[in-house]
Image: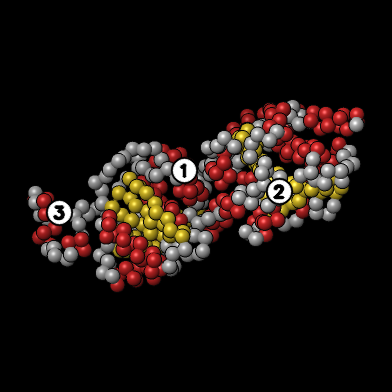
Amino acid sequence: MIQEEILVKQVKAEIPKIFAPLLCGQYRNKFFYGGRAGGKSYAFADSLLLLGRQKKLFIACLREIQDSIKDSVYKLLCDRISFYALDDYRILESKIENKVTGTRFIFKGLRDQDSQKIKSLEGVDIAWIEEAQTITRKSWEILEPTIRKDGSEIWISMNREEENDPLWVLLAAHPDERTLVVKVNYYDNPFCPKEIKLQAQKCKENNPDDYEHIWLGEPVRQGNTKLISTACVRKAFELKMSSSASPLVIGVDVARFGDDKTIFCFRRGRWCQRFEAFAKMSVVEVANQATFFIQKFKPRRLFIDIGGVGAGVYDILKDRGLAEVVKGVNFGEKAHQFDRYANRRAEMWDAINLWLNDVLTPELPQDDELFGDLCSVNKKYDRRGRLMLEEKDEVKKRLGRSPDKADALALTFAEPVFEAVPTALYQKGQISWEDMFTKQNGDAEKW
């Protein structure tokens, strides 16, 4: 018994005080982030091994991709068991068990899980998500409701990569009362070797940007890879307008696959008013919704992506006599300024970029998904020096979803829309060329 108490004190002594909340049950989500050598992985492993010796726990060690047990924290846990000589733990080929309490550690990759496979985690007491900066929104949305046992906890350790890392946006950016967020760096770790501190100091002197990311845990500074900066998007989230005299333009990005959503974006000049999202709608249902919006809000233009199933929606709307308002756009077709852009998608997305960086800052609705969509797309150039964007599938892998809201916004920039007079469609076709100019002659009451 005395030896056991000494061992417990030894393990606790190896856990820096900043990680003390790991050993109490006050929070559902325990989110620790920071730079290199902060001791996060060691503290998590030691804390779990200690708790697992006190009572029976089911502990799942998770990461986004795990092709083999070597990709997990399995080796780290084995090393710590050896370091403390914890003879009550039995190390098996793919799991670790405590022979006294019955505690069990398992190791899984979240990307391999679906709603059926992940049911094996329903009894988990503690889920440890390692390298959480790689976790997609989709993986989290499957996992989070599965860890449902009363008193269960989710431990998260990460070194931030980008401003819009999914778990950072979902949990840490605006934590609720059940979420603890702690930043820990090498100078918070009392066991950080002197050599590591010297390396950090050298990096600070030679490359401050790298120092902030590698050693302080800040997201990578956006350089020349991102088309749209986080700063201009955040600035556009600030409330500025309550009305606009500019004509209404609607962009419609039609869902191509089961997980994607059909998005309607409503924009009046510098004011992007809102987005409407719809899931699992047929082509006819999307056309019906578009018809409703046209009849209710009378947009000057409704631009719709016809590169996929949207072509069917476009055909239906044309057959309904709405061709004067509805315009089809193919993201992959030749750009209007073909000497500058590889295709229409790059041209329209760059139009968003120019719009956001205008002297008169526009307004966007505050939306975490929209922020992620806009700030996640990388740019590149073809052999002719024309701007092009990375493939949508690559963005989807990184975000865990398709950037549908940003694509819908991009569609509102398909063509310039300056007309201030109603279309013939909204006058039931009873309008002449002369009538179109009467507003300029003072006869505004006709409109």
Q: Residue at x 79, y 40 (%)?
A: 55
Of residues 65 and 352, the one drawn nearer to the viewer in this rendering: 65
| Quadrant (top left, top right, bottom left, bottom right) of the N terminus | top right
Of residues 419 and 106, the one drawn nearer to the viewer in this rendering: 106
- Closer to the chain start, of discs 1 and 2, is 2
Q: Residue at x 89, y 38 (%)?
A: 85
Q: Bin the neighbour count of mark 3 within 10 Å (Cα to Cα): few under 14, some 14-19, many 20 and up.
A: few
Which residue in the structure is indicated by mark 3?
A: 447
Q: Is residue 243 visible?
A: yes
- Closer to the chain start, of discs 2 and 3, is 2
Seen in the picture, residue 411 relative to 176 is either above or below; the reply is below
Label ID, residue 229: 1
Disc 3, SS: loop
Left or right: 191 as drawn, with respect to 426: right
Q: Residue at x 68, y 50 (%)?
A: 63
Disc 1, SS: loop
Label tally: 3
Q: CA distance from mark 2 to mark 3?
A: 65 Å
Name the spot of residue 236 as percent of width and height, x first.
Answer: 39, 41
Q: Bin the neighbour count of mark 2 within 10 Å (Cα to Cα): few under 14, some 14-19, many 20 and up.
A: many
Kindly give the residue lying farthest to the front in the view shown.
150
- Given the image, on which type of amino acid does mark 1 rest? Ser
Q: Are marks 2 and 3 in contact (CB under 8 Å)?
A: no
Q: CA distance from mark 3 to mark 1?
A: 41 Å
- Given the image, on which type of amino acid does mark 2 rest? Val
Q: CA distance from mark 1 to mark 2?
A: 39 Å
Which residue in the structure is indicated by mark 2?
A: 124
Q: Nearer the viewer, mark 2 or mark 3?
A: 2
Name the spot of residue 322 as percent of width and height, x first.
Answer: 27, 66
